[in-house]
Amino acid sequence: MSLSRKLTPKWMLKYIDIYKKEGFKAAVKAAGWKVILLIIVFYLIRDVTIYILIPYLVAKGFFS
């Protein structure tokens, strides 16, 4: 079992397997749009924090 598989939430593994075997449409049909939207919002918040908020705070001298 790979490291990324171990770090992935258990509830999401089922939908990832469906996506790999049957494609995006089947995963959306099985999971529903709420789960897909939840994943998009999670990554949006994570990326904004990593690529915008932290560099901004470093530039302002917050961490020093």
Image (cartoon, rainbow, N blue to C red):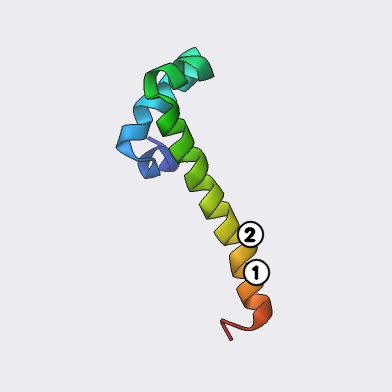
* Amino acid type indicated by mark 2: Tyr
Closest to the observer: 14 or 1?
A: 14
Q: Quadrant of the C terminus?
A: bottom right
User: In the picture, residue 14 is in which quadrant?
Assistant: top left
* Amino acid type indicated by mark 1: Pro
Which secondary structure lies at badge 2? helix
Residue, far left: 10
Closest to the observer: 47 or 34?
A: 34
Q: Which residue is mark 1?
A: 55
User: In the picture, residue 58 is in which quadrant?
Assistant: bottom right
Q: Position of residue 60 (x, y in %)?
A: 66, 80
Q: Position of residue 23 (x, y in %)?
A: 52, 16
* Residue located at (31% from left, 34% from top): 11
Total labels: the figure holds 2
Tell me: 30 left or right of 19.
Answer: left
Determine contact: label 2, label 1, CB under 8 Å: yes
Which secondary structure lies at badge 1? helix
Q: Which residue is mark 2?
A: 51
Q: Position of residue 41 (x, y in %)?
A: 50, 44
* Residue located at (65% from left, 71% from top): 56
* Residue located at (63% from left, 84% from top): 61
